[in-house]
Amino acid sequence: MAIGTTPIDHIDRHAMAKLRARGARLSPRSRNFVIDLLQVMLRQAKIWGVIAERPKFDREKEPKRMGKEPYTEAQLDTLIHHTRCAGEARDRVFVLLLAHAGLRSGEVCALRWGDISLDLGVINVAHNLSDGQEASPKGGEAAPVGMSSDLREALEDLPQGPDGHVLLRPNGRALTPVIVDRWLRRLQHQAGVPVTSPHVMRHTCLTLLADRGLDPLRLQAHARHKHFSTTEDYIKRLQQQKRAKEAAAVWDIGMPGRGTSRAPVRRAAPALEVGAHVPQAVSPLADRLPKNQPKKPSTPRSPTSART
């Protein structure tokens, strides 16, 4: 078994250095894609017993890119309305698992009917599809997620197949993360909303819950974050956006058509004729100040009163 001309049990750091040199013209993202693909192949080779230990190679640093913004409530409502009116029952369940339950792509692929309790309105997220293998969900432990009334109703209308998985392909085969991406893009194109990834749908779920004032601990439980700092990032990001909007709104104060009057513009005073009376400038605060009154004579204090 070999990759190119290099036997798979001879792939070490020296061979990896040659591979990096050959891909020097590629972008860091493309080189990392090759590294990730190689790691998957080596992991499978270890499972098959071809190699005893899997060498690990570090990924390269990529420039940070601006992630896509989550949906607004109006955009999410448009997508869900499309699946309710024009889509199939499985389309509606698929979108609501991402948007209301906040499931990850691999968790949607591995979700089974045995993990769902319609009576309790709870989904027990216990499986995750990762690198082609079913494993525990992210965090290593199963965790419950509450269902919205829309999601529960959609699950009740969805027929259960013999495979045991909640969602399958039209040909009856199991889902993969690639199929989930394509499925979501197709529905987004049909609904006329921006095309995003399943992970952005999860961000939409958590961002909208935080915007509606959900308690941070309950938000952490719904997101199934192991560390509260991960949940706190959503709250901080939302607060920063609100402060930025409030700061920008200051420019609208006093603008024409905004419902408030601007301060009058000072115009140049007309030229006065010779000998005309020139009025004294009066301060706007002049009326509030007390009129000039004669000062009262101060009475000197006695030495005794000063000492006391």
Image (cartoon, rainbow, N blue to C red):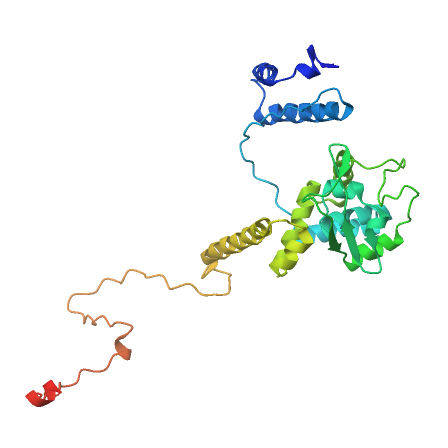
Q: In the image, residue 143 lies at what x, y percent?
A: 73, 51
Outermost residue to the top: 5
Quadrant occupied by the N terminus? top right
Q: In the image, residue 160 lies at what x, y percent?
A: 91, 47
Outermost residue to the right: 162
Q: In the image, residue 26 lies at what x, y percent?
A: 59, 20
Q: Is residue 283 above or below residue 137?
A: below
**Number of residue marks:** 0
Q: In the image, residue 91 lies at what x, y percent?
A: 82, 46
Q: Is residue 152 left or right of residue 30?
A: right
Query: Does residue 189 show up?
Result: no
In this view, the residue in front, 163 or 246, is 163
Q: Residue at x 70, y 16 (%)?
A: 8
Outermost residue to the front: 52
Q: Quadrant of residue 209?
A: bottom right
Q: Is residue 239 left or right of residue 94?
A: left
Query: Does residue 158 show up?
Result: yes
Q: Is residue 226 above or below residue 49?
A: below
Q: Residue at x 19, y 65 (%)?
A: 273
Q: Residue at x 69, y 50 (%)?
A: 75
In this view, the residue in front, 197 or 47, is 47
Quadrant occupied by the C terminus? bottom left
In this view, the residue in front, 299 or 11, is 11
Q: Quadrant of residue 27?
A: top right
